[in-house]
Amino acid sequence: MPVAIFDMDGVLYRGDTVLPHARETLVRLRASGWQVFFATNNSSASRDDYVRRLDRMSLGGDLDHVITSAYATAHYLERLEPRPKDVYVVGADGLRNEIRAVGIAVRDRAATPGLRPPPEAALDGGGDAGAMRRHLVGAELPAAADTVVVGLDLHLTYAVLAEAQRSLLAGARFIASNKDRAYPVEGRLLPGAGSIVGALEIATGRSALCIGKPEPFLFEEAVRRAGPEAGAVVVVGDATDYDIVAAHRIGAIGVLITTGLTPHDAVAGASGDAVPDHVIASLDELFGLPALAGA
Ligand SMILES: [Mg+2]
């Protein structure tokens, strides 16, 4: 059975807007016997959240066919020796919950030292930088975490960066669920998890191990689940340096769609593994590709 792996943001939807032909494309592939997987670097939601979201958008898919960087990160941590015992997450609760689901203890975000400044140190309390500094320095500190995991965090604060930096400087493992530079949403880009990872890499002089694309872990998991009978593997993504590189690392056909992070005029800038095998402007063009002949 051939396998199609779809990136999600910028390919099937942007924010809450389903992109043209997404539904028909998935229906047609499944009807032609393709196994359809969803693989996203976005770490802010759990797989359950994604299944509900896919259902709400009428795109189908179940837990077995959704692979997120949060899920892959949790399973990476689970296999480490020694196993992490105390994880500090810079990211959303979706990421915390996936790690807890494999039996590893994760601190609550609310336990971050200095997270809640007193009124005189709060930004709307006059913006006294001295008061905020004294508040952070005076906060009671727990032992450093043994592992710091970083993902997309839409509520990032300086106190959170400070706590991650402290554990990393004390020697914690440094894992990034992904290093995406941007997060494509309705009509604009927002900063991606990579911008937060980058801040901590600079703050510590260390480099995070990345689990998400362009590393091959997510796609490898999809192929593993497809089983030994898996035939051709086609990856559809919107980022040459993430989706297409990861596709080529597992020997798949990499199809770039220009509805997300990579506009058509930027494709020529790709080199090496990032050069897509095919470029399409819309999902319905997928069926004109040789690998999908007969679908
Ligand atoms: Mg994408």
Image (cartoon, helix red, strand yellow):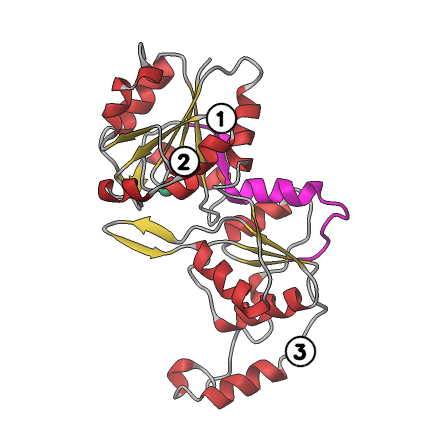
Q: Can residue 115 be seen in this view?
A: yes
Judged left or right of residue 208, residue 270 is left
Q: Is mark 3 on a helix, strand or loop?
A: loop
The first of marks 1 and 2 along the sequence is 2
Counting from the top left corner in percent of width and height, residue 66 is at 48, 33
Q: In this view, does 284 lie above or below 139?
A: above
Is residue 58 covered in magenta? no
Residue positioned 70% across, 63% down in the render: 171
Q: Is residue 129 above or below residue 247?
A: below
Cα distance between the residues tagged 1 and 2: 10 Å
Magenta-colored span: 61-87
Q: Look at discs 3 and 1 and give the one toward the viewer.
A: 1
User: Mark 3 = which residue?
Assistant: 140
Screen quadrant of the C terminus: top left
Cα distance between the residues tagged 3 and 2: 45 Å
User: Mark 2 = which residue?
Assistant: 244
